[in-house]
Image (tube, rainbow, N blue to C red):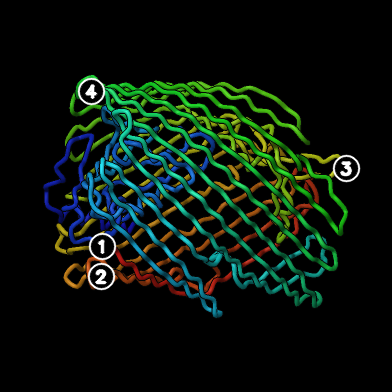
Amino acid sequence: MILLFVLAQAVAAAPAAVEAAQPAVSSYSLTFFAGQNVNNALDMVGRLPGFTLDTGASVRGFEGAAGNVLIDGLRPASKTDALDSILQRIPLDKVERIDVIRGGAPGIDMQGKTVIANVILKKGGGTRGLLAVSEYHVDHHRDFGALRAEASGSLAGGRNWEASLHAGAGPDDGVDTGRSVLIHADGRPTEIARLDSHGFDNAVVLTGSVETPLLGGRLRVNGLWDAGKFKEPETDRFTAPAIDIQQFNFFQKTAGAEIGGRFSRKFEPSTDLELVGLRTTKDSDTDSTSDIDGSFSDFFNNRHSTEAIARAVAKHRFGDKVSVELGGEYADNKLDSRTTFTVDGVNQALPAANVQVEEKRREAFAKGTWRPTPKWTIDAALGYESSDISSTGDVVLSKSLQFAKPRLAVSWTPVPATQLRVRFERVVGQLNFDDFVASSNLTNAVGVTAGNPNLNPEQDWVSEAAVEQRIWKGASLILTARHSKITDAIDRGPVFASDGAVFDAPTNIGAGVKDELIFDFTLPFDPLGWNGALLKGEMTRRWSAVTDPTTGRTRAISNLHPTDWNVSFNQDLPRWNFATGVDLSGGFSRTAYRFNLIEVFKLKTYVRPYAEWKPRPDLSLRFEMPLATAPQVRLRDTLQIFPGPRSAGGAPDIQDRQFHFPRGFYVRLLKNFG
């Protein structure tokens, strides 16, 4: 209510003039960002009115993994290299402008989004570089350093190159010290323990790309290599009903590589061709152990996966009002996963412990955009995909799947300051290979989760309506309502091992529904006399319903956040080359339903004040307090552990685990070259 009151007062006090822009496309040049503390394209995107960055989905295939930012009208020809990392490597002086497309525009592939940002780069330019070093200090005498080095430049003949190195370590800011209480339903004494967990990770990421003219077009080749380690030991010291010590350890090592390329060519006057190819590999070893009262459990998983993608798209514009796009994509995904689970040296039967899975997926699509008048835009698409999935090893299966995927999006701009958008689409989720193999969490009662290669992708019929109101220059309010009718919902259900043991596993549980209400706001206060102040945020409320496969009753979808919100306030003080602000990532809760337990996970609000000083345009010093509210209870994990399947009844044991995280600070020194 306070926020609504502030908005109402701001609207009443604001000048009547709104931002002048075309109904479908709003352009933001460097002058829009003048006086703002922005260093790169990522910072610029974060200041765009009515826009929230979506880095895309971590799924197989290329079409369904798109984020909502284009670079020179094209998607980056990479999946492993995160979109926010790519934008961060584009320096401010390399950006000519950013176009925000709302509802659709001829020649722009909206990729199923209703709002897209297109970063337009300047041509040519000399060599540029960046070097940054940072230190993250956490109480209890823990220090984590990081190094970031980037360079880019142009060569003769219209050739460009880029390279970057990121290396560093950081703490797991979800766990540290805490307390565990286990209350037994049968009257046994309550178990109380002090928890001590100090997780940390380190990673190295190398990227590089070259772009050159070729056959009348341009060829861009990019590569990435990364390696990382994550370790989270935990010691539980019991003080009741007796003195005891239990120890757990989780260790994961990963390594991956990607090589990708994109060839694009314009055929005058209005036809474009784009060819994309990429191949990724990823290896991981996961080892999770527990030592409880002299009983030692060890879960180990080795996983090797590859993905190869080939994609071709042709685009043609019929004047300024109509454009069409035809294309196709082929993806070949492979996974080889091997798992062992032992208790006191004795192998335990585990469903889908050792599997080799392959999916060959084909998709063809046609898309079109029509602007019959400056006030109306119609964006339509029809895709058809088919896939062949096979599995060998512990699970032998072979099946074929086919899906048609229509989409229709319409936007109407009755006046320049107001736009209404509606979308109707069939969304087919990408199967996640992580669901195909076993996983573990031995530190609580969740234990070992089995894999399930015999999954069908979730399908959603999505209906969406949004209204955007611009108030003054750079200010906007957006309200979005979305309804999803779900088929083949993927949730959790019981599976049985060969020895009769029961495990939890991902499974298709039938139909469901999901509703979302999203409020997005961007409020610069310059027109009100408060220069350099910007308030920006997003709030989402969700409701869902599926049928529980264990009890047959209606419940919410597992692990869906009922509420998400984030708010940031920035104050730029260009007179002193200084900026300050605070980011708030709202706390959330999620509930997971398994055949024998219910887990409620809660995370507190994340408060991060910061300040940045630029004594020179090419030098900046940044200070952050990533967890300003510590050492309060940051994470709480509560489980109801039933004596058998939840449908059988019986009072559950209650396990409540609470973690604190100590205060710390982050310092970064950044120097630009060129």
- State how far apart marks 4 and 3 are (Cα): 67 Å
Closer to us: mark 1 or mark 2?
Answer: 2
Residue occupied by mark 4 = 268
Tag 1: residue type?
Asn
Residue occupied by mark 3 = 499
Tag 2: residue type?
Lys
Tag 4: residue type?
Glu
Closer to us: mark 1 or mark 3?
Answer: 1
The answer to whether any part of residue 81 appears in the image is: yes
Badge 4 marks a residue whose secondary structure is loop
- State how far apart marks 2 and 4 are (Cα): 46 Å
Q: How many residues crowd mark 1 within 10 Å: few (<14), some (14–19), many (20+)? A: many
Residue under the point 39% across and 35% down: 262
Q: Earlier in the sequence, mark 2 or mark 4?
A: 4
Q: How many residues crowd mark 2 within 10 Å: few (<14), some (14–19), many (20+)? A: some
- In the image, taking residue 70 as reference, residue 350 lies left or right, namely right
- State how far apart marks 1 and 3 are (Cα): 62 Å
Residue at the far bottom: name it. Answer: 141
